[in-house]
Amino acid sequence: MTQTLTIRRPDDWHLHLRDGAVLAAVLPETARHFGRAIIMPNLVPPVVTGAQAAAYRDRILAALPEGMTFEPLMTLYLTEDTDPADVEAAAASGLVKALKLYPAGATTNSASGVTNFDKVRPVLEKMAEIGLPLCVHGEVTDHDIDIFDREAVFIDRVLDPIRRATPGLRVVMEHITTSDGVDYVKSNTENLGATITTHHLIINRNHILVGGIKPHYYCLPVAKRESHRQALRKAATSGDTRFFLGTDSAPHTDENKESACGCAGCFTASNTMSCLAQVFEEDGALDRLEGFASLNGPAFYRLPANEATITLTKGDAVTYPDKIETADGPITVFDPGFPLHWAVTEA
Ligand code: NCD
Ligand code: ZN
């Protein structure tokens, strides 16, 4: 008997599309299956103002192949110079759906991020007032904090104080990687959600380091030990509406990944839905995939779920390209390490 699953068209609540040649190459990989995505603003230079977000949105739509429908949901990169009035106008026009907070130096292209959180207080207060979500890269950057502890320390030292000081601020903890992140979300009933990536449901830190270093599994926040992966799986497949999909699909060319100082990021856009169907099936939660990928995110962002649907069908091993070719060089597609059996057969 053929097994099929039809769900509302999913959205990706955390996506890196880059610009230029890479944008043109990776955009169809997402638009093929996803209706919308929250577009990360960490370009060089970053997308800081409403006008820059409008121009970036136009470039994304211009790169969309004919016949594909996809709605980019734009974000602004929060800096210490961000103007609350510009944020308010960009949100009121419907263009901007969130601001992204990168602690300065935390990850790829985060040099313009925030060092002194007091300086962004007026912006955070404006956001709380108008209900605009803050997407948070939750890692401290202190040199004396171990990289595997940076998320847990961020929650205590930065995130919780910000939330207490700004009542009503709506926060998405992006790409959580620890049981500490899961627990923090679960212990707070109001104004807090979290995205979980596809790869953090599948790999732990052994995948990166055992048997030779695997640069294509290196991303930030870095994958943690197995018990944390288990906690993420449980949260994602639990049906708890505070957890939703944000792939953090982050393309870097092979040249930049396979290097003495390799870039952080896993490129999962191409096979995310096949990976997720397998994860949810393994955990006996196929009936909850739609909530995680298609319903919980729109509910948090106060947007309607997509009307369109996609159908997944279980069968022989799915084939997908190892690499996406771009004018800047090839980009390796995430290898889950096991054959995938769910194919998107209608989208
Ligand atoms: C992202 C990127 O490459 O832009 N990299 C990553 O490892 N996830 C940045 C980010 O989201 O931290
Ligand atoms: Zn990201």
Image (cartoon, rainbow, N blue to C red):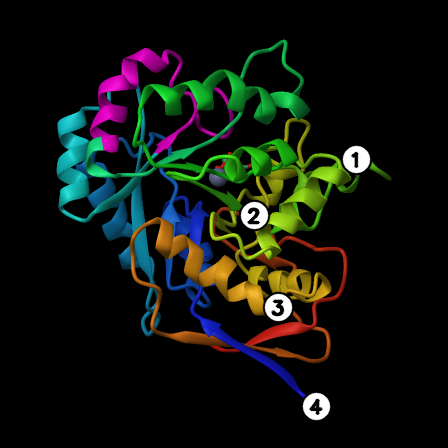
Q: Nearer the viewer, mark 4 or mark 1?
A: 4
Q: Give the residue pinned by disc 3.
A: 286
Q: Give the residue pinned by disc 4.
A: 1
Label 2 CB, ligand 1: below 8 Å? yes
Q: Nearer the viewer, residue 106 or 139?
A: 139
Amino acid type shown at disc 3: Leu
Give the distance between the C-alpha atoms of the residues marked 3 and 2, in whole angstroms: 17 Å
Counting from the top left corner in percent of width and height, residue 5 is at 56, 77
Q: Mark 2 falls on what kind of element?
A: loop
Counting from the top left corner in percent of width and height, residue 287 is at 58, 69
Give the distance between the C-alpha atoms of the residues marked 4 and 1, in whole angstroms: 40 Å
- The disc, 1 or 2, on the residue closer to the chain's N-terminal end is 2
Q: Nearer the viewer, mark 3 or mark 2?
A: 3
Q: Specify the segment rendered in magenta.
A: 100-128
- The disc, 4 or 1, on the residue closer to the chain's N-terminal end is 4
From this view, report whether residue 149 is shown above or below residue 251: above
Give the distance between the C-alpha atoms of the residues marked 3 and 4, in whole angstroms: 17 Å
Q: Nearer the viewer, residue 68 or 244?
A: 244
